[in-house]
Image: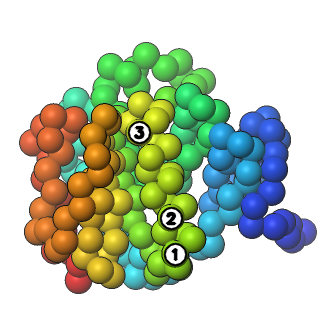
């Protein structure tokens, strides 16, 4: 087995990224709209446990509600600006998902989710990494994502990103509601805070 070592940020074309990602499916990477390759470190146990809890809650609601499809952090979406992004959790309205061809659904879907969640991991708590996450959240909005939650479980802080609105910051909320994007979805944050 060969080892691939690359700088954390490296420029690629979208086609080069797609080929690299297909050959390295167990490496978590994204591509910015400017062609920068972003290689994310593996998730630690605490962040992985909390991310599973987020994905589980959204998945259970999705299955019961039936109006959309939810995805975990291993799904890479091609945003309208050309970036390849993998939110920690995401959801797409069923009619938008079904408008994609089977081939598009099987590959990196060329669609921006309607809703995303990004969980701040301990390694993201440096100023630059956190600012990068905030810029990523804004990029989601700029590319048709309607609602996004940036959740910092260490400080128990949530930044809510809504299309066309200023960012709302909540300190230690117990729940978050899906508003008009995911009507009826309520995320219980107690398991995320613990």
**Mark 2 residue crowding within 10 angstroms, few (<14) / some (14–19) / many (20+):** few
Q: Is residue 30 left or right of residue 175?
A: right
Question: Camera-side residue: 163 or 96?
Answer: 163
Residues at marks 3 and 2 touching, judged by CB atoms closer than 8 Å: no
Q: Quadrant of the N terminus?
A: bottom right
Give the residue pinned by disc 1: 127
Residues at marks 1 and 2 touching, judged by CB atoms closer than 8 Å: yes
Rendered location of residue 70, percent (x, y): 34, 43
Residue pictured at 63% horizontal, 60% vertical: 28
Q: Is residue 51 left or right of residue 126?
A: left
Residue pictured at 80% horizontal, 39% vertical: 13
The total number of labels drawn is 3
Q: Can residue 114 be seen here?
A: yes
In three-dimensional space, the C-alpha distance between marks 3 and 2, rounded to whole angstroms, equals 16 Å
Give the residue pinned by disc 3: 141
- State which quadrant residue 19 falls in: top right
Q: Quadrant of the C terminus?
A: bottom left
Give the residue pinned by disc 2: 131
Q: Secondary structure at mark 1?
A: helix
Furthest residue toward right: 2
Q: Earlier in the sequence, mark 3 or mark 2?
A: 2
In three-dimensional space, the C-alpha distance between marks 3 and 1, rounded to whole angstroms, equals 21 Å
In three-dimensional space, the C-alpha distance between marks 1 and 2, rounded to whole angstroms, equals 6 Å
Q: Secondary structure at mark 2?
A: helix
Residue pictured at 19% horizontal, 65% vertical: 170
Rendered location of residue 133, percent (x, y): 49, 60
Q: Secondary structure at mark 3?
A: helix
Rendered location of residue 53, percent (x, y): 29, 66
Q: Earlier in the sequence, mark 3 or mark 1?
A: 1
């Amino acid at each position: 087995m060969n080892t691939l070592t690359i700088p954390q940020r490296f420029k690629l074309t979208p086609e080069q990224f797609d080929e690299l990602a297909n050959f390295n499916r167990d490496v978590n990477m994204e591509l910015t709209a400017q062609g920068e390759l972003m290689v994310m470190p593996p998730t630690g146990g605490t962040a992985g446990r909390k991310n599973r809890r987020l994905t589980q809650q959204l998945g259970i609601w999705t299955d019961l509600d039936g109006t959309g499809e939810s995805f975990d952090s291993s799904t890479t979406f091609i945003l309208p600006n050309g970036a390849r992004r993998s939110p920690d959790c995401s959801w797409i309205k069923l009619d938008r998902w079904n408008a994609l061809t089977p081939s598009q659904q099987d590959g990196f879907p060329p669609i921006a989710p309607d809703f995303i969640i990004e969980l701040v991991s301990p390694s993201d708590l440096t100023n630059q990494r956190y600012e990068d996450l905030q810029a990523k959240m804004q990029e989601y909005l700029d590319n048709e994502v309607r609602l996004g939650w940036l959740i910092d479980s260490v400080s128990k802080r949530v930044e809510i990103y809504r299309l066309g609105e200023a960012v709302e910051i909540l300190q230690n909320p117990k729940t978050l509601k899906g508003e008009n994007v995911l009507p009826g979805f309520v995320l219980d944050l107690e398991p995320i805070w613990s």
